[in-house]
Image: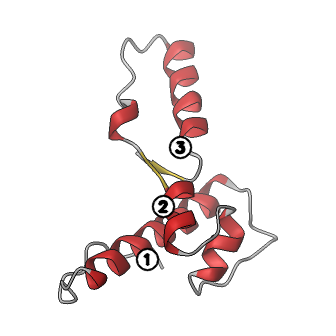
């Protein structure tokens, strides 16, 4: 699970599992990546809008805080950070992930 403020997302998934009687949450806390922390290191910002702007993405304030838009922007930010790290480590030919368009 990749999320911007992943503990919040995990709590939502946990509540949905409990509400629906699902016996086991499919996401373990150790299998999550929180882009808040990654963005702080990579672009110097922790707020999603500011982190995306610092990464060079346009931010649409009208669509912000919608689940789909925020998920797409978090995915773009994750790919930006991951690809940047792989480039800094000398693996420029490796595209770790492609962000959604």
Disc assigned to residue 31: none
Q: Mark 3 points at which residue?
A: 6
Give the residue at x 59% y 31%: 12
Q: Position of residue 32 (x, y in %)?
A: 39, 43
| Label 2 or label 3, whichever comes before in sequence order | 3
User: What's the distance in space between the residues labelled 1 and 3, CA to CA?
Assistant: 18 Å
User: What's the distance in space between the residues labelled 2 and 3, CA to CA?
Assistant: 12 Å
Give the residue at x 52% y 30%: 13
Most foreground residue, 59 or 69: 59
Query: As drawn, is 36 to the left or to the right of 23?
Result: right
Give the residue at x 40% y 45%: 1
Q: Residues within 10 Å of mark 3 (few under 14, many from 20)?
A: some
Q: Residues within 10 Å of mark 1 (few under 14, many from 20)?
A: many
Give the residue at x 25% y 80%: 95
SS label for mark 1: helix
Q: Name the residue under label 2.
A: 38
Q: How crowded is mark 2: few (under 14 residues within 10 Å), some or many (20 or more)?
A: some
């Amino acid at each position: 699970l990749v999320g911007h403020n992943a503990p919040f997302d995990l709590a939502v998934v946990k509540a949905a599992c409990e509400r629906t009687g699902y016996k086991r949450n499919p996401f373990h806390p150790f299998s999550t990546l929180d882009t808040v922390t990654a963005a702080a290191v990579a672009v110097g910002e922790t707020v999603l809008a500011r982190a995306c702007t610092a990464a060079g993405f346009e931010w649409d304030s009208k669509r912000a805080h919608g689940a789909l838009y925020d998920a797409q922007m978090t995915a773009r930010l994750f790919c930006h950070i991951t690809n940047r790290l792989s480039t800094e480590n000398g693996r420029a030919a490796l595209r770790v992930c492609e962000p959604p368009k």
